[in-house]
Image (cartoon, rainbow, N blue to C red):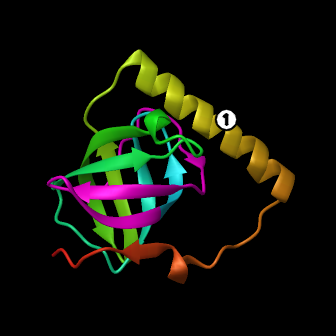
């Protein structure tokens, strides 16, 4: 399968919350991010293609500054989920670009270090 991306993805290591049908199912580490979608280190968490999820980005300690975006599963592989955002606005794009820019600065300052992906997910419930 060939994946056609419209925008460049940036390596980002943030923790996001994943919701399925309004229920928190996991906190995952991001692998990469673009304004169109993202890849997550999802451990054993897997969903079928076209499953609707929500991704919540926390913004610091103030929960009012978090952003929850609807997304659809575009691929589910061993330990990785690929999501495409299904809703976009200028505010959303600005928020995501800010996170991507911040991650790019951190990544270049830290160098190219491998991270332990086995502990990248904390499951809240089992969803298959």
Q: Is residue 117 magenta?
A: no
Q: Is residue 16 magenta?
A: yes
Residue at 60% x, 52% y is 12
Residue at 33% x, 72% y is 77
Q: Is residue 44 above or below residue 75?
A: below
Q: Quadrant of the N terminus?
A: bottom left
Q: Residues within 10 Å of mark 1 (few under 14, many from 20)?
A: few
Coordinates of residue 45 in the picture (x, y in percent): 30, 74
Locate residue 75: give its quadrant: bottom left
**What residue sits right under mark 1 in the picture?**
101
Q: Quadrant of the C terminus?
A: bottom left
Coordinates of residue 62 in the picture (x, y in percent): 53, 40
Residue 91 visible in this rendered orientation of the protein: yes
Question: Relative to the observer, which residue lies in front, 4 or 99?
Answer: 99
Coordinates of residue 3 in the picture (x, y in percent): 35, 49
Locate residue 104: give its quadrant: top right
Counting the numbered discs, the total is 1
Residue 1 visible in this rendered orientation of the protein: no
User: In screen coordinates, is 79 left or right of 11?
Assistant: left
Residue at 44% x, 65% y is 28
Locate residue 21: give its quadrant: bottom left
Bounds of the magenta segment: 1-28
Q: Is residue 15 above or below residue 69?
A: below
Residue at 56% x, 30% y is 97
Coordinates of residue 27 in the picture (x, y in percent): 42, 65
Helix, strand or loop for disc 1: helix
């Amino acid at each position: 399968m060939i994946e056609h991306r419209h925008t460049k993805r940036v390596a980002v290591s943030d923790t996001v919350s994943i919701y399925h049908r309004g229920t928190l199912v996991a906190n995952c580490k991001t692998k990469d991010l673009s304004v169109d979608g993202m890849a997550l280190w999802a451990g054993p968490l897997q969903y079928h293609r076209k499953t609707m999820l929500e991704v919540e980005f926390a913004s610091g300690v103030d929960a009012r500054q978090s952003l929850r975006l609807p997304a659809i599963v575009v691929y589910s592989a061993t330990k990785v989920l690929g999501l495409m955002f299904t809703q976009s606005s200028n505010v959303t794009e600005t928020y995501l670009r800010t996170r991507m820019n911040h991650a790019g600065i951190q990544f270049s300052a830290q160098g190219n270090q491998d991270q332990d992906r086995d502990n990248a997910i904390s499951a809240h419930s089992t969803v298959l």
